[in-house]
Amino acid sequence: MDRPDSTPTVAPAGFDCPECGEQLAVGVPACPRCGIRLVGPLAQQLWRVDQQIAQLSAESRRLRELLRQPPTAAELSPVVPSTVTPGVRPPHAPPGLAPQPVGPTPHRGLTGQQLLLGLAALLLLSGVAFFLLVVWSLIGLLGQAVVMVVLTVAAAGGAVLATRKRLPAAAETAAVIASGLVLLDLTAAHRLGLAGLDRLDASSYWAGAGLLGAVVLLAFDRWVPRSDAHGTLRRIVSYRPVAVALATTALWAGAIAVAPGDLGDVSSSALALVLGLLSLGLVALGVRLDGSPRLFSVSSAVPWLSAGYALLVHLGVALDVGFSNASTGDRVLATVLLLAGPLVLLLAQTRPFLADQPGLRVGLRLVGLAGVALALGVPVFATPRLGVALVALGLGLLLGGLALIGHDGATDRGWAELTWGDLATWVLRLAIAALFFLLFLLLGGGHASGVDMQALRGGAGPGQWWLPLLPAVALVAPSAVTVVRRRSVSVALLAHTAALVGVLMALRDAETITWAVVGLAGAVLCAALAAAARWSHDGAHGLGLEVAALVAAAVYAVVTVAAGFGESDFVLSAVLVGLGAVLVAYAALPGRLGFAEVGVFALALAWWVQLADREIEVVEWWTLPVAAMLAGIGAVRWRRDRGSRTWVTMAPGLTVALYPSLLVALSEDSLVRLVAVTAVAALVLVVGIANRWQAPVLLGALALAFVAWTQGGPLIAYVPGWILLTGSGLVLLVIGIMWERSIQTGRRTVAWLGAMQ
């Protein structure tokens, strides 16, 4: 039976010496040229090592060839297999695969070689420039061209030679010199009048010279070898950035050369847009030349700057024309130009090269949608006020539809996972807010449209009071759906702000009583929303919603109180009573009893306004009702928590009840009031001592001490001096004799007071 492969194996006729490369016959025990031994265990081990080195070199060349190509799907996988021997760091290993050194990383500065090469390049370029200036007019046209070409080609050839010799620093220096010579040649050819080129203006010349220089430098870059028999050679960096920068220069120079001097605003915007798009094309060219998987590389830096500047000019001019009182045709053209950029972005985000960059893709979508909304705002700017409000209402309906299907932007997903609906939601909110602001300007200035506002034409009147409510409803209604579904605090703040601004704008010409009533109703409604958020027990989200509603309620409260001040005492009292009742009711919620004191303060203000209106001056009418309400709050606190301090539960009511009447009794010499206050203070002191309540004891004792000092103090003047001196001495003598016991008594008194509740 035949064997699958009957071809005989042919033994090699010879081999190369591993040391000197001499061709040797098989079986030679040692190399006759260098004397290295070729037999024995060490020779076999050397042969195996050489075979492994050859295999690894071949694998290294293969990997470098693959790395010059775009990454595949397998390379983008987060799991990277490691073939590095543990503890051994291969040369040029990526930081993620190489063992990290222990200790501080040494600072990498300029080496001596780099300084010398850089200085040499500067001196050579300076010398060449001086040579051209001196001998330019002496060598004629042919000599000029020969000198320029020879010097430049010589520098480029030096870069090629240094690359083949594997001298990367020298090769890069030669490439820098060659690039500088190209720029110097192009500049000298124009300034020194080579072949009459000085007759061309600068923009026309550099439109062609820039392209020529870019082509020459890219040709130099292609001239540099990429690999040799020993593997891949290091690629030169200098040529590509300079070439792309020259192409960008040619682009702008050509635009300046062909653009007429009287170019209009719309045409300027269109030209800037074209320059921006062409600059983006140069960005793509630079990225591709550098082989970068990202949108930024060294060669794309200058085109990025060019594109940014051109697009900013385009936007500035187009917005200035669109949102002005220009002609209808110019505004239509501005709208079309403003739409072009966003549409390009929306088209670019669909390209396959962005498949591995979802965050950038979402960013392009958002910017594109925002740009479309801005462009479509140009025709709305010329719409009458009612049209602006209706457009806002229509956007609100679209926003509500997105909220109902769950695309409301208030999700826990990351930036890269946002959907088209989420992005459209935020763009619509911003658009409605912008229309809201435009309507505010139109109504405040009496303008019929944005075009009239730009032309400073008024006379349209204040407009219907309900117009501002339409954009407010367009924001509030969809936001309410989002708040209910998502419990979003930021959207709740947006809804409260929109409602407040809409209400205030609607009331701009209303009567004061209307302001008071609407403000009180808004405060009540926001307090109810805060109570609902409190009852939801939704943790941090519920607390955020509650705080947002309370802030809005506070703003409405300020509005209604200010309106009450401007109306009448009765309206002010009614407003304060309403706010106080709302606060007291809100205090019934768990953990919100502190609002009761604020409510009592509002009720006290309402009571005092009425007393002042009726000119009632009896102090007890002013204090006792307030003290009763504070006592009631203290009783509620006491029932909820028997461990509460008496300074919180009893002190406020006792202070309001006792001390104003005491001060009035002492100032007016009212014996009946003084006796009554003294009796009440003594009763408070006794009750406090009996129940071990600290606040009643100290407040009652302080009131009695004040009465004793003010009433008994003047009688001291009638006591003879020798009695005062003798009595003071006896008191001090007793204290000195019983010093230790006095200290113990004082400590027991302090401990007794501290043990009280």
Image: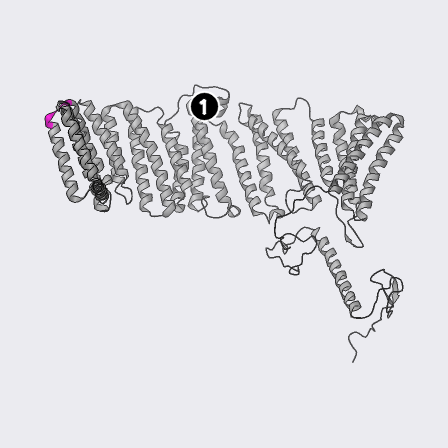
Residue 369 makes an appearance in the image: yes
Residue highlighted by disc 1: 448
Left or right of 727 on screen, residue 445 = right
- Assign a secondary structure to mark 1: loop
Q: Residue at x 46, y 31 (%)?
A: 435
Q: Residues within 10 Å of mark 1 (few under 14, many from 20)?
A: many
Q: Which quarter of the rendering shows the C terminus?
A: top left
Helix, strand or loop: magenta stretch = helix
Q: Which residue is drawn at 39% across and 46% down?
A: 485
Q: Quadrant of residue 602?
A: top left
- In this picture, is 367 found above or below 324? below
Amino acid at dot 1: Ala
Q: In which quarter of the image is residue 661?
A: top left
Q: Residue at x 76, y 28 (%)?
A: 205
Q: Percent x, y for residue 471?
A: 41, 33
**Extent of the magenta region:** 668-672
